Amino acid sequence: MYEQEKIKPYNEGEKGQQVEQMFDNIAPTYDELNHRLSWNIDKGWRRKAIGQLAPYKPQRILDIATGTGDFAILSAQMLKPQQLLGTDISEGMMEIGRQKVGKLGLDNVIKFAREDCMSLTLGDNEFDAVTAAFGIRNFPDLDKGLAEMCRVLKPGGHLSIVELTTPVSFPMKQLFAIYSHTFLPLYGRLISKDTSAYSYLTRTIEAFPQGERMVDILKKAGFREARFKRLTFGICTMYFATK
């Protein structure tokens, strides 16, 4: 078991159920907080992660832990796939995503479905690309979730992940620690009204395996040619792998 798998948002219940409850709770303020807390840099991170897939022109894309659909929407706009399926355990988050997709007229491309990433109901070898933005560190079982992402990906298909990480070099490591332990949970608590959510998210960022260790985990899950690239002094990391 990885350290972040032991961390739960609340005191009682199975982690997957707690994560679902947490994201339902913070769904109305999630987008605003994401952009404000990252100073809108998260939009650039998403573009870079999607750009990794551009040379391969994937036509069927699965976006795991899609949340409110920001990554799915940007993928549809940048990659022009025929179909894009966004999945999540939080209906509250996806309902906001559906509203955004409807306003943008992307209903014919993007669909949403409630799925448990630990046990997808999707068939083997269905998708040209699988993506995940800022969600895999919430998996109750990282190995199992990544194995499922590999299973539904076609042979030769690609995985693109972008995830929050902790900087490894001075002084960003120290500055990020101060920011993530003081301002981030306090501001998140004030805006979202959830006293635990943003403290939980900070702790999972610190505990989550990153860099070379994450590349090894991806290979263990069935991917090959896995690589990573740190962004913005290591506050965020992109991963790219092939089945």
Image (cartoon, helix red, strand yellow):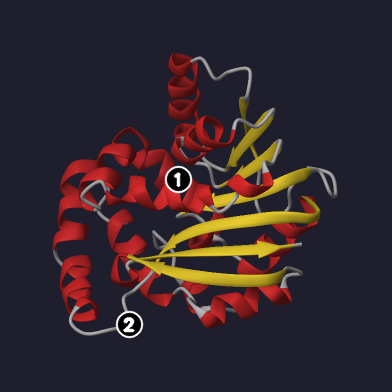
Q: Earlier in the sequence, mark 1 or mark 2?
A: 1
Find residue 116 and report its horizontal and vertical position in percent.
65, 48
Find residue 242 and report its horizontal and vertical position in percent.
71, 62
Q: Is residue 211 left or right of residue 216?
A: left
**Which mark, by number, is residue 88?**
none
Does residue 237 sit above or below 24 in this rendering?
Answer: below
**Screen quadrant of the N terminus:** bottom right
- Report the residue that reaches farthest toward the front: 55
Q: Which residue is mark 2?
A: 168
Tell me the kind of residue under disc 2.
Val
Residue 60 in sight here: yes
Find residue 125 and report its horizontal and vertical position in percent.
84, 49
Task: Give the mark toward the camera: 1 or 2.
Answer: 2
- CA separation in Å, label 1 and label 2: 32 Å
Q: Residue at x 69, y 55 (%)?
A: 158
Q: Which residue is mark 1?
A: 21
Residue 193 in sight here: no
